[in-house]
Image: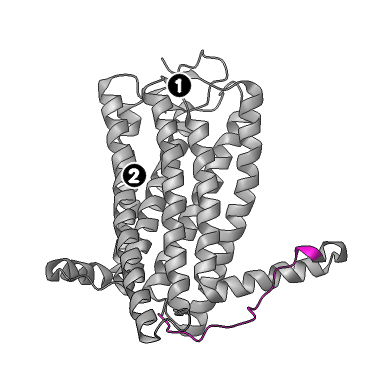
Amino acid sequence: NMVSKYSRANKVAIWVITGLMAILTIFFNLFIFLMSLKSYKQNKHWTPCETIITALSLANGAHQLLCYLWMTMTEIDKDCRLEELFYSLMILTVFSLKFTIMWTTSFLTFYYSTKLVIEPIHCYTKIQEAILKHVTTVVLVIPMCGLSTCLPMLTVLVPENNTSENMDCGSIMPDDTPGMIYNTVYLVLSNILPGILMVKCCISISVHLGIHLQHMKASTNGSHAPKLGSEMRVIRMTLALVVVFLCFMVVDLYAYYQVTVKKENAILLSFLFTSIYTTFSALVLIYGKKTFWKVLLHSYNVGLDEFPCLSCLKVPETKRKPNSAHTVKH
């Protein structure tokens, strides 16, 4: 049987930290969603990038709310008096949303890489074009795939031993070989495969950036540093998303190691790591959209105006030397 590795104090600490992350995650993702709605009202449509980002912000927000709700309820309902299935369904939905977040983020980096890099392989380019023609469909299919991938949890995995101390209500853990196999398959589908796609896109963008900088430097005879303008912003955002994702994947793999090898229930750890990831990835997404970033900085500075003693924390809203830009629409 699985055993909970956390003392009561540890569980409360994780709950509190997750709560702080929840506030930031909800704020950033609500900001993205409202800014996307404003853009839709102005332009009467969303660009493919805006469609993906809006879907990602909704998945991030829903995941964080459900995650924190489950943790709060297990703190309040210490004896798990509510139906076990209710808690298990909440956990299933959280993992389904996590799958959606991973693949939607991966799809976003794929989208940007196709816009920035022209692949030399004709067949691959045709596949890219076919996918990008149906962005909305892909964004809707991803959560359905997440749900269908997670449904077997209820039959393959078993509830955590309810007699154990500091139990987590509704925790479903692998207890035999089929459970371990399912856990491994879910890990590959939800973390490793989207991670591989993101790394591939990251390498393509990095190579493109290197070649582009070389060409620009050669064309200016090295007299000054080449400028890429908004394209450079998109590149920085995409690479930052990949770095944040890879950091998350490493710590999430540790949580899975605790479950499969150490036989410990690390579900709280997994939820905490995902909460931190959704917070930082949302901030990176805001940075990637220049209009979003400018509004966020302005709002932040206006908020600080109410507290003169905090004026030192203000962030400059404009650069001293604005770039004349080779732009990419995003």
Q: Is mark 1 on a helix, strand or loop?
A: strand
Residue 31 location in percent, x, y? 59, 65
Could you tell me the amino acid type at mark 2? Ser
- The residue at 60%/41% (across/down) is 18
Residue 62 location in percent, x, y? 50, 51
Q: Mark 2 points at which residue?
A: 190
Q: Name the residue under label 1.
A: 264
Relative to 37, residue 256 above or below: above
Please tell me whether residue 294 belongs to the stretch shown in magenta.
no
Residue 139 location in percent, x, y? 34, 61
Contact, mark 1 vs mark 2 (Cβ under 8 Å):
no
- The residue at 40%/71% (across/down) is 49
Majority secondary structure of magenta residues:
loop
- The residue at 47%/33% (across/down) is 86
Residue 115, quarter of picture: bottom left
- The residue at 21%/70% (across/down) is 119
Q: In the orientation shown, which residue stands out farthest toward the left?
A: 123
Q: In the orientation shown, which residue stands out farthest toward the right?
A: 309
Q: Report the quarter where the C terminus lies.
A: bottom left
Is residue 76 something that shows in the picture?
A: no
Residue 227 location in percent, x, y? 46, 80
Could you tell me the amino acid type at mark 1? Glu
Relative to 116, residue 262 above or below: above
Which one is in front, 251 or 161? 251
Measure the C-alpha gap from mark 1 to mark 2: 21 Å
Q: In this view, does 130 lie to the left or right of 215?
A: left
Q: Is mark 2 on a helix, strand or loop?
A: helix
| Bounds of the magenta segment | 312-328
Is residue 42 something that shows in the picture?
A: yes
Which one is in front, 77 or 205? 205
Density class for disc 2 (Cα within 10 Å; few <14, some 14-19, many ≥20) is: many
